[in-house]
Image (cartoon, coloured by chain):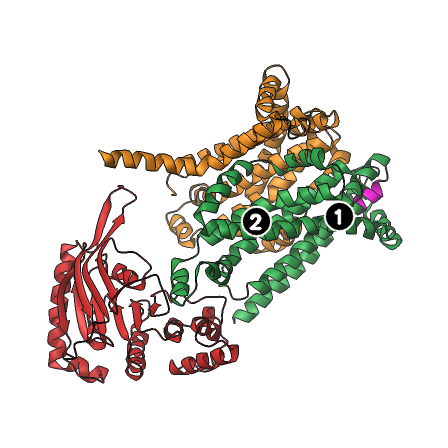
Amino acid sequence: MNVAAGWLSAALWRRLRRCYSVLLMLAIWEGAARSGLVNPFLLPAASDVLANLWRMLTEGQLLYHVLQSLMRAGAGLGLALVIGIPLGLIKARSRLANSILDPILAFWFPVPKVGLIPMALLLFGLGHGSKIALVFVDALLPLVIATYQGALRIDDRLVWSARSMGDTDFKILSRVVLPGTLPQILTGFRLAVTVSLLVVFLAEMVASSSGLGHLMIYALRTLETKDVFSTLIAMSLVAFIADGLVLVLRRHLLVWYE
Amino acid sequence: MAAAPRVPKIVLRALHKDYDDRATGRAVAVIRSLDLTVGAQEFVCLIGPSGCGKSTLLYILGGFVPPTSGEVLIDGRPVGPPGPDRGIVFQEYALFPWLTVLENIMYGIRSEKARGLRRLRAEELVAKVHLTGFEHYYPRNLSGGMKQRVAIARALAHDPDILLADEPFGALDTQTRSLMQEELLRIWESDRKTIVFVTHSVDEAVYLADRVVVMTARPGTVKADITVPLSRPRNFDVVMQAPEATALRAELWRLVKEEVLRAGYGA
Amino acid sequence: MKATAAQRRQRDARIGSVVSLILLIGAWQLVTATGLVPDDVLPQFGDVAVTWWQLLVSGELVQQTASSLSRQATGFAAAVVCGVSLGIVMARHRMVDDFVGPLTSVILPIPKAALIPLVMLWFGIGDIAKTIIVFLGTILPILVSTYHGAASVDQVYLWSARSMGDNARTLLWRVVFHAALPEIMAGVRMGLIISLIVLVGAEMLAGQGGLGWMVFFTLDSGAYRVTYAAMLTIAVIGYAYDRLFLMLSQRVLHWAEQNP
């Protein structure tokens, strides 16, 4: 019936409306690059960039560098989780800890910790250590703050019920506090993941011999424009997938929450 | 009832309103075949079970929501987009939190060009709702009753012919609510507007209105349209003890209860 | 009663700041003085402090700071103006949203650091390039916050305003903007923090003066005390800038409900 046809095109129309600008931009990009309107050195065609990306993946060492970056980011994140979550819980629990930690956190929160790159390099050398240290420092704060805020929100009465049922402190922590704080922690974790990737790429750009950041700056210095673009896409994909994984994790862990 | 054969202020004829239910994708009828007339300077209360469409009816009158079909006439002309001819007061007050009491009220005054004149007029309104001294307070420092008074003053600021009220006293405690009801009547007596007032409370409707319109459960239509046989001005205690008032309240409650039960206790 | 509790919290905060500062400097001194960390990796706090003072007096520090801040300020200001305007218009005009929205979603996952080499490729290593980097890195979080704030303005505000005679245009700037302001300010604050990150990163990579350059250049040349002095300056500026912004935010949002 006409109703069905109308409905179909309405949904299609809506879908189209939501992505036509991206398609348009891609078309303009491709057209401008191919037609020679723009210097192909400055703006290689989109299709060339994608082909190049494929080449880097299959023939080049792209995967190796991706793993280097991920490994450093992951290690830093892992450390930040292990130290940050307990710190956040302590901060929520103890007035004393709070008054000592709070000013430290408040001070370091807005500071661009990338400024500490030289210090990290001096302390840990040019290898993995410096990058991991930087990721750790940057990922720590969002996690501590998120854990702290999440723990604060836990209804005291939940804790009292558990205690009156005879639960030990540890049990209360693992059965009541942590699950209750999980939504906030995951939000902080999502931010920490974004920041980690940002920092690791930046640190690799400044001083590294491996990783996506290094790859990009190397491409810039050797004027391999296509590689610059391809690496940019690679970085974006990595960030996008990482964020997507966090969201999947969130949905999985928080089935009860939403 | 007035004998003069003027054009009624508000005329609703065969009003239908459907909403799209996003969950099922189908249209849900909220209002169906509704006919209603409101005369100029009449105070009409709409009561009915939750979800019966009484607020939606108000929003249609205000021009915020379009009707699906039917006629909605104000002064004989089809209703248009929201405008200064209709003032609205919400249950949540809707005061702009970034403006003071005075500034909120001044926001509605469009008749004066000079800021000084607007200010003067706003101060008059502040006095009218008994909030003198609070002109420079921000909404977050006001109690519910005070906020609602500002909301009413603001709605009156642009001198609308019609005042639409969506359960304005619903969020207030009982004492404040009574005081606000008296206040509203007092303001109305001094400057009679046409008022369409949505409420859950039968008592409130009987106290305030010239006419009470009972709506059915969804899809809403007019179940009963009863004139309130009490003279004005109405003193709360006297009025509520009067046998006519008690009888009316019982009758209205019976009608509403029927619809509430039909709706399944406000599903 | 409420006043004293808040005052007590402020007093605690101040004492806490002093204590943490002392702890940090103490730890620094301890680590260097005992030789736990060699002097060429982490100079003593005292030495760094002296160097910092010398740099200040000689005018070098001021010059580099001014360089950095001017680039950051221009890019940031432009990002705020464009981001907020666009965000508000997007939130209330479907057509604009349909066009800009998907583009934003595509650009959003790009790590801001990745933009630096790209902009360097197109615009070189000068001031303009750095300003553009700051602009691009900052505009996105501001846009997203503004959009979200503007899109979630309570319907009753809009309806009240319209019944009082506002048309679509006055509605945007007299109601939507103000109602969204708390969220806008939060987004702008994030933008500020990000702007400093990309600025320092860009200066490290592209050179041409500024605090980021200073930190990196002296690292190469071995003048570590200057390196640390510059790092400290970056830290202090980051903190001070944020503090100032929070104070401004307090003023601007004085009417907002206090959230616990």
Relative depth, front residue between C254 and A12: A12
The reply to whether the magenta stretch includes residue C40 is no
- Which image quadrant: the N terminus of chain B? bottom left
* Residue of label 2: C142
Whole-percent x and y of residue B128?
A: 38, 82
The reply to whether the magenta stretch includes residue C227 is yes
Q: Is residue C23 visible?
A: no
Chain A: its colour in the image is: orange
Residues at marks 1 and 2 touching, judged by CB atoms closer than 8 Å? no
Instruction: Give the amino acid at mark 1.
Output: Ser
**Is C234 on the left-hand or right-hand side of C179?**
right
Magenta part of the protein: which range?
C224-229
**Is C258 on the left-hand or right-hand side of C115?**
left
> Residue at 24% across / 64% down in the picture?
B73
Instruction: Give the amino acid at mark 2.
Output: Ile
Spot the residue most to the top: A59
Q: Which chain is green?
A: C
Q: Which chain is red?
A: B
Relative depth, front residue between B143 and A145: B143
Q: Main secondary structure of the magenta part?
A: helix
